[in-house]
Amino acid sequence: MPRKALYDLQEVLTQAIEVFLEHGYHGAIMDELIARTGFNRRGFYLEFSSKQKFFYQVLQHYQNTHLAPIMAHLDNNQGLQSIQGFFDHYVLLVRGRGCLLINAITELGFDDAEIREMGRHYLDRLQISFIGCLEKALQHDEVVSSIQIESSALQLTSYVQGFAVNGILSAGADELQIATRSLLGPLQRG
């Protein structure tokens, strides 16, 4: 009869997020991952088989637990209100830490097809969601009628990436909130 696991997988993945945010993939050493997650080395390799496969699961968990609630603002598709809500919460997430997914893309995206695919999927979803919200904003006369929706959505998606990197450097949210207002201001109907 198989033995019941003595750990909570979701908790292990959550604790690992912090380690990878602090050190990146290459800087996160196995001894610290084992110590901070409560795993033993043998159990770790039985469960995940490698640090790389473990990292993929951590990234998936991060997307489900950290990014999905923020993406829900865009999924609500309430025009500019949804976009503002997304950025307000994203700024809080990345402040002083960055975004684990964007950090992973930056660190590993050239060499790791799985990370590149995760990143591409996330950024495509962001852009499509921004398009939907901008279309709704146009219908409700919230944005200027001359808006180029697809290029504006691409610009917003690019800003998300920049905010993630800037969030590492910025301990306060003020800079990023000012940048958000400056970004959305020209789109709004006067």
Image: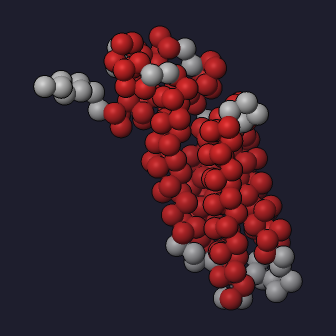
Q: Which of 46 and 5 is in front in this view?
A: 46
Residue at image coords 62%, 18% = 27
Left or right, 6 with reference to 59: left
| Residue at 41% across, 18% down | 45
The correct choice, above or below, for 182 with respect to 14 in the image is below
Asked where in the image residue 13 lies, by quadrant, the reply is: top left
Q: In which quarter of the image is the N terminus?
A: top left
Foreground: 101 or 108? 108
Would you say residue 174 is visible in this rendering? no
Q: Provide residue 98's location: percent of width, then percent of height.
A: 64, 39
The residue that appears at 52% across and 47% down in the rendered structure is 63
Question: Where's the C terminus, which quadrant?
Answer: bottom right
Q: How is the image coloured?
A: secondary structure
- Of all residues, the one furthest to the left in this rendering is 1
Residue 86 visible, this angle: yes
Q: Quadrant of residue 133?
A: bottom right
Is 1 in front, or is 42?
Answer: 1
Measured from the top left, where is residue 107 in percent x and y?
71, 30
Question: Residue 103 at x, y = what percent?
Answer: 67, 36
> Residue 174's spot in the image, x, y percent?
68, 49
Q: In screen coordinates, is 13 left or right of 18?
A: left
- Which of 106/85 is in front? 106
